[in-house]
Image (tube, coloured by chain):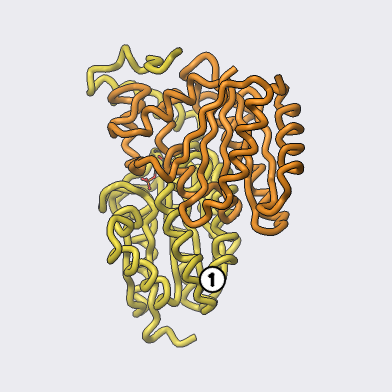
Chain colours: A orange, B yellow
Amino acid sequence: MKALVLNGVGKDSRHLDRIEEVAVRELRSLQWEVEALILRDIEIAPCMGCFGCWVQTPGVCLIDDAAREVTRKMVGSDLVVYVTPITFGGYSSELKKALDRSIGLISPFFTRINGEVHHKKRYARAPNLLGVGIVHEPDEESARIFKTLIGRNAINMHNPAHAAWVVNEDQSETEIHELMHTALGELGVRS
Amino acid sequence: MNSEGNRVLLLVGSPKAPGKSVSEALGAYVIEKMEARRWSSETIFIRMSLQSDEGRAALVEAVKTADLIILSFPLYVDSLPAPVIRAMELIAEARFDKGTHFVAIANCGFPEAQHNKVAMSICQRFAHASGLEWAGGLALGMGGALSGQRLEEQGGMVRNIIKALDLAVDAFAENKPVPDEAIRLMAKPIIPGWMYTTMGNIGWRRQANCYGVRKKIRDRPYQR
Ligand SMILES: Cc1cc2nc3c(=O)[nH]c(=O)nc-3n(C[C@H](O)[C@H](O)[C@H](O)COP(=O)(O)O)c2cc1C
């Protein structure tokens, strides 16, 4: 089983990398093959909103940079983990720069899911999604928005299972490890 | 509040070029109406402003000197486009505590306006974290039926949008938040849902056809 960990921690909060590192260790201890990408070290241009990835070079973004590889790796994974400082309830800009460039993973064509319009799948199988959001201090509203966002993304990107966990930046390694363990159990992918 | 000398700042959150985005068309309408009420205005395209140190500094400075900030953006992956989040991070770092009113206008590609809900919560949270005063948000669906043209030139389809924005402008001029009626009108479907999705699906095929990839539109280039 392959996991791709996207670390969206910004350059001014590198101390938060340890949370990604615990997540990676937990997955490796369960025999997952893990690749972690530190997005702040990867040059990724912003999406230009052209929909070229749907109508011009279907499935591939027109901008030829590292985002293409990130997207390819997402397709090739059984689990994608977003590690991000919760930023106003949502993702950090470092994580989001990669996600905006990944919509080639789905089809432009519309379908209905739970009474709402979404896009159809492009690939037969999408990875499961785990969101690990980091907060500076307990913040229920931010946690609520973050969990809703992960759930909404999972519908749009057709992730078969998803879970969202919020950790405090000063939580101990043991606690984070416990949270990861529970989250993976929730996803049904502990081993 | 005396409207003389007041300043409105439009932040365009679409990465598209000037003149091309729905976000700009919606925001520009509000700006014109505020100018007619003698507000001075400034428009900043976020993606471009982030390309240089000067641009970033000008962005933060413009936020500092505004009396009303309007962020108009497209919904990207259930949230805001990455450059907009980057701008928010910079603004929150600078934190002004001036209580400047902050309004968000969201448009999305799905027919239902409710897709914008999470992004609106994020905007509200951002305002709170930056010492701005949340003055409400307007959200619409079916953005794919609109264009970057001036709103007045987009036909009868946009009449509720115009009504909504007019109500909002009346409120802004009196330093009031976005009225509920404006939110309701903005969220109204501009054409029937089935028509939007049918035309949308035809549109994707037609565009793919133009690029000679109609048969490839369902390709899976990264299939493992
Ligand atoms: C990368 C990307 C992600 C998008 N994600 C969503 C989404 O999650 N939900 C939605 O309804 N529309 C989504 N859209 C569609 C845009 O919100 C829509 O096309 C909008 O009208 C564009 O506005 P603009 O002209 O101001 O850029 C997405 C578009 C792009 C390019």
Q: Is residue A93 above or below residue B167?
A: above
Query: Residue at the spot x=34%, y=61% of the render?
Result: B28
In-image side of A51 versus A189 (left or right): left
Query: Residue at the spot x=40%, y=78% of the render?
Result: B65
In-image side of B200 versus A17 (left or right): left
Location of the C terminus of chain B (image quadrant): top left
**Residue B216, position as x, y percentages in the image:** 33, 14
The quadrant holding residue A108 is: top left
**Residue A31, position as x, y percentages in the image:** 64, 20
Q: Is residue A179 among the parts visible in the rendering?
A: yes
Q: Is residue A134 above or below residue B89?
A: above
Residue at numbered disc 1: B132
The yes-or-no answer for disc 1 within 8 Å of ligand 1 is: no
Q: Is residue A14 above or below residue A62?
A: below
Query: B216 or B196: nearer the eye?
Result: B216
Image quarter where ligand 1 lies: top left
Query: A168 or B175: nearer the eye?
Result: A168
The residue type indicated by label 1 comes to: Leu
Query: Residue at the spot x=32%, y=58% of the render?
Result: B45
Query: Residue at the spot x=70%, y=57% of the render?
Result: A139
